[in-house]
Image (tube, grey):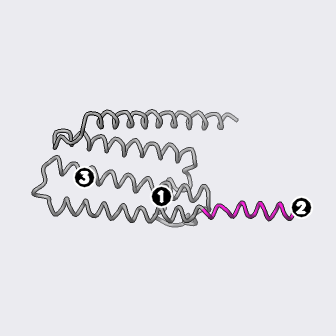
Amino acid sequence: MKKVEHVLEAGIFSSRWILAPFFVGLILSIAILFGGFAKELWHLVTHFGSLSETDTILGILALVDMTLLANLLIIIIFSGYESFVSKLDVSEHEDKPGWMGKVGFSTLKVKLISSIVAISGIDLLRTYMQLDNDGTISLEVVKWKLLIHGVFVISGLLFAVMDYLTSKSSHNH
């Protein structure tokens, strides 16, 4: 019976590798995102003289938005892989990010919601910039975006408070 238990536990432990293709998929999604980034950057560069100030700002905000999303994906890939699949053997690499290996699951949740709040804020700023531009954005859309952004902000604050309380209680025990 002990042997069956050992085989079962080894199988369960090995099943974590099923997650690896998800992380590969996220890496591919960064490549796709880079395509969109390059397209937007090319548009800004080739239309530099003919874009209005608002269109230039909107284009730059789109680039910032995609950059934040790519950063978020990197954090999820590295932290998720290290937390659930296997440690990355890059401890000696000179370019190893300082946060790598130090971001646990609870910290990852706070970083995730913080990034979502930042991305939502940029989208809200883009919406604001478009209000006077062409009038295609309704007040209803703006209200929904504000409400959703507010929910993200409140969720982020609650996650941060829960993370703080959890870390405080674990230090006391």
Secondary element under disc 2, as helix, strand or loop, is loop
Residue type pointed to by label 2: Met
- Is residue 15 one of those drawn in magenta? yes
Instruction: Find residue 97 and name its label.
Output: 1
Report how far apart the C-alphas of labels 2 and 3 lie in the structure. Answer: 63 Å
Report how far apart the C-alphas of labels 1 and 3 lie in the structure. Answer: 26 Å
Q: Earlier in the sequence, mark 1 or mark 2?
A: 2
Residue that label 3 marks: 60
Q: Nearer the viewer, residue 152 or 108?
A: 152
Residue type pointed to by label 1: Pro
Q: In the figure, residue 145 lies in which quadrant?
A: top left
Secondary element under disc 1, as helix, strand or loop, is loop
Question: Which residue does the image show at 36% across and 43% down from the upper left?
Answer: 120
Question: Magenta region: which residues?
Answer: 3-18
Residue at the extreme right of the image, as rendered: 1
Q: State the count of labels.
A: 3
